[in-house]
Amino acid sequence: MSDGGLEGLFSYRDEPVEEVAEPVAREKSRAWWVVRNALLIAGATVVTIAALRAGGQHISVVLVVAFFIGLRAVLFAVSEVAPPALPKRRGRSSRVDDGRALDSLRIAVRRWERSLDRAHTDPDLYTSNVLPVLAELTDERLRLRHGITRASDPRRARELLGDPLWAALHDHGRRTAKSRELETYVDALERL
């Protein structure tokens, strides 16, 4: 399953993600691509020159053509370095109800939610997955906000955390925490 740390929480996959091959685009000829871009540049040049002349401005046609060629080159370069599409999940849509694409943070949060839901009924899962992550988050929060960890200054850490969170982190028994207790722990971490 996982080693109990943040790395295990982020790397554990409950549902397999299958790579979906991108649809094979029709093989377009290079000549058609050149003709299409030439027509696009010519059309944009004609419209630009006409608009400038209607406004009483005179500019070199070569300059306008060079501008649009440069613009097409930049757009082509940007399209070549576009990020790859997200892999589609097997048996599910890759979109949420409100139409936004799933991102890695949402996937990680959902994995955390499932892990916490299962931990309510499985004391071993709670002890091996939830408590180590909670301890790691607590030490990191103490280190960032107060310059200590639970190991370096236990007395001060216990004062800052409060007895309920301190007892939960040091109780190696096989009991699970209730939702209300977890909320109390998170509130204590946020107050740090």
Image (cartoon, rainbow, N blue to C red):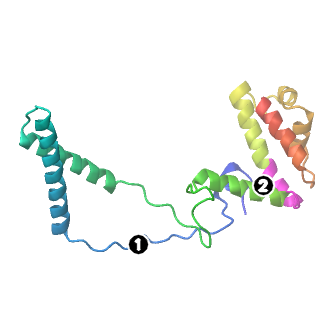
Q: Is residue 158 visible to us here?
A: yes
Magenta stretch? 120-131
Q: Residue drawn 79% across and 35% down?
A: 189
Image side of residue 31 versus residue 74, left or right? left
Q: Which residue is mark 2?
A: 129
Q: Residue drawn 89% across and 44% down?
A: 181
Question: What numbered label is drawn on residue 23?
Answer: 1
Provide residue 161's location: percent of width, then percent of height: 84, 32
Q: Residue 79: within the magenta? A: no
The residue lying toward the viewer, choosing from 24 and 118, is: 24
Label 1 amino acid?
Pro
Q: Is residue 147 visible to us here?
A: no
Q: Mark 1: which secondary structure? A: loop
Quarter placement of the C terminus: top right
Label 2 amino acid?
Asn
Q: Mark 2: which secondary structure? A: helix
